[in-house]
Amino acid sequence: MDILNLPTFDVRTRQNPKNSQQEIWDTQRRRWVKLTPEEWVRQHFVHFLIEVMGYPSGRIGNEVCIRVGQLERRCDSVVFGDEGEALMIVEYKATSVRLTQDVFDQVSRYNIALQVDWLVVSNGIQHYCCHLNREANRWEFLPEIPSYPVLTQR
């Protein structure tokens, strides 16, 4: 797997005994999942949120199902607040995927259902965070991902 612009951690991988696929342990879902380039980014980013940025492990959900109009979609990760409210959507891409307007449009469509104030996209190399300035009614790019205490203050 690619080297990422994220801290390393004690990654648990295995070869699935049934189908020989490489898998990685997802601590949030508490199960082995197929190791894809996008999953590699997700696991590192979630570890970063928990270990570096102070996000409580129990407040991060991976592959969260939502309904957008008549369609069912899955957010890569959603960060929740103290009362179970969605605070942030995180969308991951493989390192080979450029973070274009299409990626931001995708996460914005998910936000139709969740109405969060924070959107993050990452390909493991580049990370972008946007915050909704409700007074100006516009998204503003931030220089870094906020810590969990900052996230819950706004």
Image (cartoon, grey):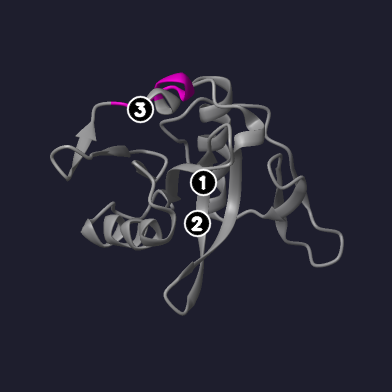
Residue 29 in the image, given as x and y percentages of width and height: 71, 47
Check the image and report above or below for 153 versus 83: above
Check the image and report above or below for 77 versus 136: below
Residue 118 in the image, given as x and y percentages of width and height: 35, 40
Res 1 visible: no
The quarter of the image holding the N terminus is top right
| Residue 124 belongs to the span the image colors magenta | no
Q: What amino acid type is highlighted by mark number 1? A: Val
Q: Secondary structure at mark 1?
A: strand
Residue 64 in the image, given as x and y percentages of width and height: 58, 56
Q: Nearer the viewer, mark 1 or mark 3?
A: 3
Residue drawn at 46 percent across, 80 percent down: 70
Q: Which mark is residue 75?
A: 2
Q: What residue would you read off at disc 3? A: 154
| Magenta-colored span | 144-150
Distance between the alpha carbons at the discs numbered 2 and 3: 22 Å
Quadrant of the rendered structure where residue 126 is? top left
Q: What amino acid type is highlighted by mark number 3? A: Arg
In front here: 78 or 85? 85
Q: What residue would you read off at disc 1? A: 78
Question: On the picture, is 32 further left or further right than 134?
Answer: right
Residue drawn at 53 percent across, 34 percent down: 81
